[in-house]
Amino acid sequence: MLQPLQLPPFPFKITEQDGKLTLFDEIRKKHILITPEEWVRQHFVQYLINHKGYPKTLIKLEGGLTLHGKARRTDIVVFNPNGQKILLIECKAPSVTIDQKVFDQVARYNMVHKVALVAVSNGLQHYYCRINFDEQNYKFIEELPPYREVYI
């Protein structure tokens, strides 16, 4: 049984292949093995699209980046129509506590991406931050803004 999350439910196209559950990923256009982290990622993507108005065509999943000479993957990056990154999201499995270590990971990734809006979620807890690079500070915000407020 797949764990209920603190995100709106979505009627995913779930199938079983070789005793493992997969779902059709609308962004990558292929079936993806459902791991706990992927379950969170897929729900968060649908939340972005269906509840916050983020265009599906401007969302990239598991994009690569190089940090300190090592290949890394960011879970979700959202762009504006000009190709600028406007939102970075790190997803964790529901069993992973969102702690300083997780925030440090996102901060390291964001040294490369330089995105002003960052989110972290384990599907049960969600944290949102606005980064001010000029003043070198950040501020937690209560809720993820809709796309129309992020892309101006």
Image (cartoon, rainbow, N blue to C red):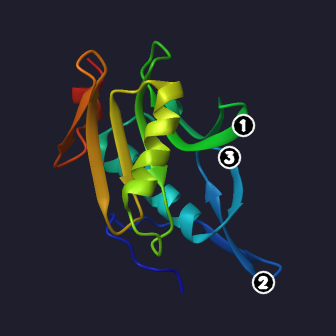
**Which of 1 and 99 lies nearest the eye of the viewer?**
99
The disc, 1 or 2, on the residue closer to the chain's N-terminal end is 2
Q: Which of the 4 quarters of the picture holds residue 73?
A: top right
Q: Name the element at disc 3.
A: loop
For the C terminus, the quadrant is top left
Q: Which residue is mark 1?
A: 70
Amino acid of disc 3: Lys
Q: Mark 1 and mark 3 in contact? Answer it, CB < 8 Å.
A: no
The disc, 2 or 3, on the residue closer to the chain's N-terminal end is 2
Q: Name the element at disc 2.
A: loop
The residue depicted at 62 percent of the width and 69 percent of the height is: 35
Q: Which residue is mark 2?
A: 19
**Which of 27 and 60 lies nearest the eye of the viewer?**
60
Q: Nearer the viewer, mark 2 or mark 3?
A: 2
User: Does the rendering let one see residue 22?
Assistant: yes
Q: Position of residue 128 (x, y in %)?
A: 28, 46
Image mark for residue 81: none
CA separation in Å, label 1 and label 2: 34 Å
In the image, is 38 to the left or to the right of 141?
Answer: right
Is the residue marked by circle 2 packed among few (<14), some (14-19), or many (20+) residues within 10 Å? few
CA separation in Å, label 1 and label 3: 27 Å
Q: Position of residue 124 (x, y in %)?
A: 34, 69
Q: Which residue is mark 3?
A: 29
